[in-house]
Image: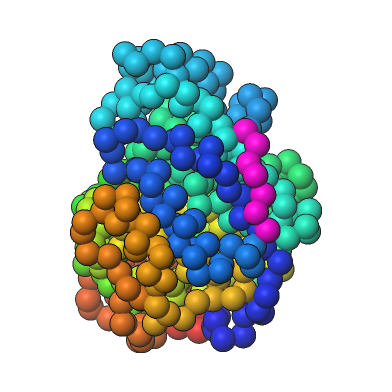
Amino acid sequence: MVTAADTPRGCPACLVWGEGFLSYDFGEHPMAPVRLDLTVSLARSLGVLERLEICPPEPAREAELLTVHTPEYLNALREASDDAGFFGHGLGSDDNPVFPGMYDAAALIAGGSRQAALKVWSGEFQHAVNIAGGLHHAMRNSAAGFCILNDVVLAIRTLLDSGAQRVAYVDIDVHHGDGVQAAFYDDPRVLTISMHQDPRTLYPGTGLPKEVGEGAGLGSAINLALPPATADDGWLRAFRAVVPSAVAAFKPEILVTQCGCDTHHEDPLADLALTVDGQRQAYAELHALAHQAAGGRWLALGGGGYGVLRCVPRTWTHLLAEASGHPLAADLEIPPSWSDELRRRGVTSKLPHVMGEGRVPDPQSWAPGGETWLDRAIWATREASFPLLGLDPLDPRD
Ligand SMILES: [Zn+2]
Ligand SMILES: [Zn+2]
């Protein structure tokens, strides 16, 4: 059982960050770069950035991107960067509109995640974060779901190419981590775990428990499909019933997490119902898991999250604080300077005043035999995946 109470404090951690990340900008689109900008300004106003080393990103080189994507796709992406009318390989769609310089913008984010991976693997830092990363839907030969280049796959490939033998990936975005799962579906060195809203009710339509990997990678993919409206307690119950024991059984050398916060109850694109408090707790448990099961090595990437004012800045500021080993209290007041800055930028909607929403998550433990949709979802995942990892799906201690 992972308890966040024992997590070390003051962990050496870095944030890969530069203003260049803000050029990943589809224009009128839910994936607005202002969500990153507001996160960094909130983190700065609370002193969180002073506890992290800030590393400027460098773009991924073509040879590196070719370990993830096809040459045809990279050529198409280059063309799309100069041609507003380009259509193909998933580019030029409503989800992935083309914009000038998109190749460079996406390559900078991918390079940032690659650097972050190397910072942790080399031992320079215990933890590294790239909140612009986590673009988990991009496929080998196409863009998908707002994701142009798959920085997660590049980061994991970089780890494998640097000698890692066992990498655990946990994806808590509300959408299935399909691009990452596809890249390593037959690779026994990478365990991918995705927790997401049931794909029968949400994009991208994959991520059912029966997807467990194939060939040499049989058992290396785990999918937990949650009922719509799952809130803090149900989400944490499901997490605790599957993720810690699966990761521990895999014995990874490093934990990579996609920390999308589109599970929030106000998120405009999906239907889970977590609060900032539940999301904060999730990051605390991932951090604890890195120390207890992955040698303390933790690479944390961003992901979805479209509540740009009330969710993303608070939730990812908690992520940054957690990674630095100095978590922030949920009832901490937000400095008025942050809200004033937003007012000056023309924001008129209601802004939060504290770092949480007044909830204290208190999940019940999972036990076999429950009849709710959530219980059946947890069971379906344990039944499909636990025996392949040598775990007993019926034993609640596993
Ligand atoms: Zn730590
Ligand atoms: Zn998402």
Q: Quadrant of residue 91?
A: top left
The residue that appears at 49% across and 47% down in the rendered structure is 132
57 part of magenta stretch? yes
Can residue 243 be seen here? The reply is no
Quadrant occupied by the N terminus: bottom right
The residue range painted magenta reads 53-59
Residue 47 on image: x %, y %:
56, 69
Can residue 18 be seen here? The reply is yes
Residue in the foreground of this view, choosing between 357 and 181: 357
Residue 253 on image: x %, y %:
70, 61
Residue 377 on image: x %, y %:
31, 67
Residue in the foreground of this view, choosing between 195 and 98: 98
Residue in the foreground of this view, choosing between 186 and 113: 113
360 lies left or right of 273: right
The residue that appears at 54% across and 76% down in the rendered structure is 327
138 part of magenta stretch? no
| Vertical position of residue 356 compared to residue 180: above or below | below
The residue that appears at 26% across and 53% down in the rendered structure is 347
47 lies left or right of 366: right
Residue in the foreground of this view, choosing between 332 and 256: 332
Q: Quadrant of residue 107?
A: top right
118 lies left or right of 203: right
